[in-house]
Amino acid sequence: MSDLAELSAVEASDVPVRRAEVDLTQVARDELAARESHLRAAGLAVGSRLDGPVLVRGDSDRLHQAVGNLLANAARYCRAGDEVTVQVRSEADQAVLDVVDSGPGIPADELPHVFDRLWRGRAAKQVAGSGIGLAVAREIVVAHGGTIQAVSPEGAGTTLTIRLPSST
């Protein structure tokens, strides 16, 4: 399915969310393993801090897709020599996944738009992409009753955080 068709289907709730108990830590491990060669080929150092298990009720395939989109975004926008770390932990009644990078960051005026459909920032002019990946991730997270946010202090990298209701 194309990125735009995927986003449209997720937005219209045409893509079912099949809920089962899913270990978010395992989702992160799987996606890191699947994308590690791509991240390293982009010149990035890859790390993780994964508490586990961290259980949620969700659709494993969709959660893999959301986490994969965050990692693909890091590979696309970070510079060779930057670091990308995935962290998963429990906080009260939430499962929290962070993708933290030491990349160039996102300008403050662009930060409110990073999850908008088809939106691409000024730095994206030199980078291939559709402006769909983070929008799809947002729709998947919201369909799971969660939230996603981006924090990017000026010139100090970016942290993308997914918060989902814990099933424990």
Image: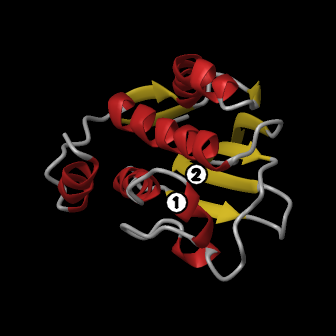
Residue occupying the point 57% across, 58% down: 126
What kind of residue is marked 2?
Arg
Residue under numbered circle 2: 163
Residue occupying the point 79% across, 55% down: 157
* Colour theme: secondary structure
Checking the image for residue 19, the label placed there is none
What kind of residue is marked 1?
Thr
**Vertical position of residue 136 compared to residue 60: above or below:** below
Which quadrant, please, contains the C terminus?
top right
Disc 2 crowd rating (10 Å Cα; few below 14, some 14-19, many 20+) is: many
Residue 3 percent location from the top left of the image: 28, 48
Q: Is residue 42 left or right of residue 69?
A: right
Q: Is residue 13 left or right of residue 83?
A: left
Query: What is the CA distance from the residue labelled 1 to the residue labelled 2?
Result: 5 Å
Residue 120 percent location from the top left of the image: 49, 67
Residue 69 percent location from the top left of the image: 48, 42
Checking the image for residue 147, the label placed there is 1
Specify whether residue 166 is in view.
no
Q: Nearer the viewer, residue 155 or 50?
A: 155
